Amino acid sequence: MRNLVILRLCGYNKTVSDSMWKGCVAMYQQIAEYFQTSSERWFSMLAGHIGLSAGALLPAIVIAVPAGFLCVRYARLNRPVTALFGTLRIIPSLAVLLLMLPVLGTGALPAMAALVLLAIPPILANTIAGLNGVPDFMLETAVSLGMTQEQVWWKIRFPLALPLIFAGVKTAAVEIIASATLAARIGAGGLGDLIFTGIGLFRTDLLLIGGGSVAVLSLLAGLLFGLLEKMCIRYKTI
Amino acid sequence: MTEYLIKHYDDLAEAALVHLQLVLLAMVCSLVLAAALTVVCSCSGKIAGIVTGLLAMIYSVPSLAMFALLIPLTGLGKTTAVIVLVIYNQYLLLQNFLAGLDSVDKGVTEAAAGMGMTNLQILIKIRLPLAREALAAGIRIALVSTVSIATIAASINAGGLGTILFDGLRTMNIPKIVWGSLASALLVILTDRVTRFISPHRGPA
């Protein structure tokens, strides 16, 4: 009885809750129907999304990690490069994507270029932090053991910086997967198509499927790279 | 290109104002909520762990999806946009607030407790002033990211600079797209620079 009074005070109303329940059931049916009728289309959009994200992440790693190495090797480069990419990072992803439009046109290529730009800053920053974060005494020990500079880089600095680099890649991957949703706006495909269609047609089921899929995808990517990061940490003793 | 700017600079300025209004509203709400959450989380480590874990999970949901997912619940428009911005900010703010408050030297807080201060007094008179820089840094990061994400809020009709972007895209009006993107980029960079200038931050950025 007391619970009922509290529920009433909270605005609980049987008919309202009934209609909400019916709405949920209807929503579930709609989603189930979508997967029955157009699961192929969903899979192709998912594949497009993953392809777009991977296609942006790889070039970003290939650019950012060597750039980070150069920034640490030649300390003079550090400030201008990090300032440049720091500024690039805070620019809204939508603006970066749309600025590519007049230059590269529509499609997957401009989207990928924009996503690469978005993914570079976190990887670069973490590479620099990781390489610089190796304690001096370790480098000195390595040198005094008779390692050449090259060996110090490959056997000491990079392995010790790897967990942080992977943390950067994780941030970048999550950011790319999220921003790739917006890439649908410039005709790059992916799960963003579903969300924009859902907004356009006011179809809640499409919104739930699209948003949910992207959310799960970015969570999975975060978990995957988190695992890789943990695997690299075994090198780290301090 | 410049013709658009000369003709429609008032549109850009108006959109920027709406944008800032949205950001301001979201920031005020998120600061209040984050302050409350910080007090709750600083009571027990367990609650802090659960709350930050949950917020980290929410933070990894892409903003467009988040905006879209809330449409069925709160409809199109500003309310939904502000709710999403506030939710995103909680992660950034809470993380920085908790780290800042934790970074205060234990000796100082123990001395304060030894002088007979209550927990609340320690929080307000000792830990808050000493953690000022970290708190300001958290607020700055949250503000910049809010200005940035608010662009996407235009996709659910919340107004702001994103409206110009989406309008330009719909009609394939290249000058509109370019100036809209440049304006939103400029607004974020300006926010970043101005807040960096006024925040109590010493040493290199």
Image: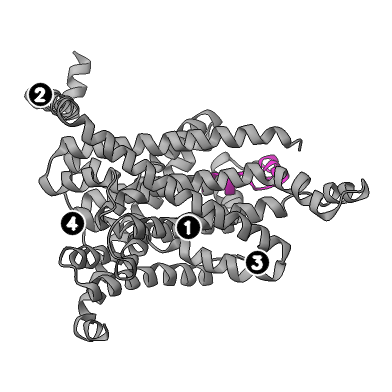
Q: Same chain, marks 2 and 4?
A: no
Give the CA distance from mark 3 to mark 1. Answer: 22 Å
Give the letter of the chain under mark 1.
B
**Badge 4: chain ID:** B
Marks 4 and 1 belong to one chain: yes
**Residue A22 — which label?**
2
Q: Amino acid at mark 3?
A: Asn
Residue A197 in view: yes
The Cα atoms of the two marked residues, 2 and 4, are separated by 28 Å
Q: Residue at x 47, y 38 (%)?
A: A222
What secondary structure is found at the residue carrying circle 4? loop
The magenta stretch is: B97-115
Residue identified by numbered label 4? B157
Image spot of residue A107 (x, y percent): 29, 57
Amino acid type shown at disc 2: Lys
Q: Quickly name the residue at label 3.
A: A78
Residue plotted at (18% across, 38% down)? A206
Amino acid beneath label 4: Asn
Among the two numbered marks 3 and 2 on one chain, the one whose residue lies closer to the N terminus: 2
Hey, which residue is sitting farthest top in the picture?
A: A1
- Is disc 1 surrounded by few (<14), some (14 to 19) or many (20+) residues within 10 Å? some
Mark earlier in primary sequence (4, 1) = 1
Front position in the image: B165 or B49: B165
The C terminus of chain A: image quadrant: top right
Q: CA distance from mark 3 to mark 2?
A: 59 Å
The nearer-to-camera label among 4 and 1 is 4
Q: Which mark is residue A81?
A: none
